Image (spheres, grey):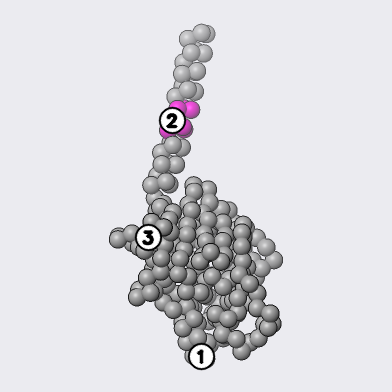
Amino acid sequence: MRDGRTRGTRALQGTVGLLVGLCAAAALARAESTADLTGTWVLDDSLSDDPAAVLRERSSGGGSGLGRQIVRGVNIFGIPVGSLPVPTGGDDESQEPEDLAGPAAYTVAAVERLRILQESAASAFDYDDATSVIYQHGIREESEAGTVLAEWRGGTLEIEHRLSNGTRITETYELDAVDQLHWTVRFKEHKADGVVIERVYYRTKT
């Protein structure tokens, strides 16, 4: 009987050891698959889109005015730490997208300096010392305006906003072979043509 209990104990210990090893290997694989975005990043104007110009072109091309709707409709989820000032002149349809400051203004601004602090469970972003936000990886957050989910897809951090008005905004952050950061924002509204804004940043020590 004692030999049977001993064999059972050893088998259980072996199973537990195998599970621990598999979990550790999975965690290591996930860690190795994510890029290190931590640092201070400076805009490379020569390789980046001008967001205001992209949205003006989209709006003047006979579209649905998606650029203006984006700035008015988006909420930053995650854990907001700061925000841009709201204009006192009201929500004037004649204003250009870059003049409609609000919680989504960082996505249509030519952000010159981007600071990122990346941890295993969350990533914090600071846009030109004007707006800061923290996203928890793999946790879908909800509000009346819609939902947001930040998750790693291989070496790319993807943040997807699904708004209650049907608009989808997807941000991706990824490094290229020469350690430049590509921040791409894609806007999609129902069946309308999408809008894509891509910016490229280089890492700096300050």
Distance, label 1 to label 2, CA atoms, is 61 Å
Q: Observer-nearest residue: 38 or 139?
A: 38
- Seen as rendered, the residue at the extreme front is 206
Q: Main secondary structure of the magenta part?
A: helix
SS at badge 3 = strand
* Residue 30 percent location from the top left of the image: 43, 47
Which segment is the magenta one? 15-21
Which residue is drawn at the image coordinates 69% and 66% (left, top)?
A: 144
The answer to which of marks 3 and 1 sits earlier in the sequence is 1
The answer to which of marks 1 and 2 sits earlier in the sequence is 2
Foreground label between 3 and 2: 3
Foreground label between 3 and 1: 3
The residue singled out by tag 3 in the image is 203
In the depicted structure, whether residue 89 falls above or below residue 20 = below
Task: Please tell me the numbered disc located at residue 6.
Answer: none
SS at badge 1 = helix
The residue singled out by tag 1 in the image is 60
Amino acid type of the residue tagged 2 in the rendering: Leu
Q: Are marks 1 and 2 in contact (CB under 8 Å)?
A: no
Which residue is drawn at the image coordinates 44% and 36% (left, top)?
A: 24
SS at badge 2 = helix
Q: Residues within 10 Å of mark 1 (few under 14, many from 20)?
A: few
Distance, label 3 to label 1, CA atoms, is 35 Å
Residue 192 shown in magenta: no
The answer to which of marks 3 and 2 sits earlier in the sequence is 2
The residue singled out by tag 2 in the image is 18
In the depicted structure, whether residue 33 falls above or below residue 127 = above
* Residue 18 percent location from the top left of the image: 43, 30
* Residue 134 percent location from the top left of the image: 56, 56
